[in-house]
Image (cartoon, grey):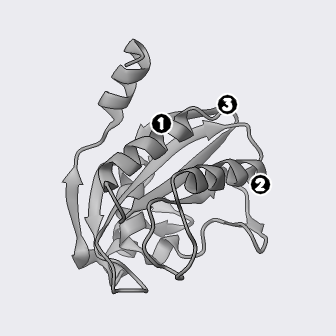
Amino acid sequence: MGHKVYIALGSNLGERESNLRNAVEHISNIDGLTVDKLSHIYETDPVGYLEQDRFLNMVIAAATDIEPLELLGKLQGIEDRMGRTREIHWGPRTMDIDMLIYGDKKINLPCLKIPHPQMLKRAFVLIPFKDVYDCPEVLGADINKLIQSCGDRDGIKLYRKSLLTEYRLRKIFMI
């Protein structure tokens, strides 16, 4: 598979951890995509629209040959099947799935911007991203310095260690 893709997941409605697990399962079942790494799960304060429950956030590192717009459609389909509604900007959601980086591609379309334009400003993205990214720098900037400069970094705590071992066992034993 040709392109490394990083995908952020977030949920703050319903059974948040179960929502993340289901999203990982749906994403891992996309033909032409292989999940390589799963970050730890972090509980985070909401950003933007503050009158809502805390989020659980994580990041997936995967490899794919699927073109970015096609992958976006598949990821949005997963959001829709999981009950995602888009009523309030930055509002509550059962599942939010964002492509952060797709190989070395730069895309600037109304429906898709790669790299994700807000990722370097959000600790709730950068901290789990750091778990699965193999380099101390991202997009020419030091990840630790970026995290330190984020205003939301104090509202983040480790919720659960990575689901990767569990995910791999389920794939091996088809549980």
Disc 3 secondary structure class? loop
Q: How far apart in space, not on screen, are marks 2 and 1 (Cα)?
A: 21 Å
Disc 1 secondary structure class? helix
Q: Which residue is mark 2?
A: 69
Q: How far apart in space, not on screen, are marks 2 and 3 (Cα)?
A: 15 Å
Give me the disc on residue 94.
none
**Does label 1 or label 3 sit earlier along the sequence?**
1
Quarter holding residue 151: bottom left
**Does label 2 or label 1 sit earlier along the sequence?**
1
14, 58: nearer the viewer: 14
Q: Which residue is mark 3?
A: 31
Residue under the image location 29 percent in, 42 percent down: 162
Under mark 3, the amino acid is: Asp
53, 167: nearer the viewer: 53
175, 60: nearer the viewer: 175
Give me the disc on residue 25.
1
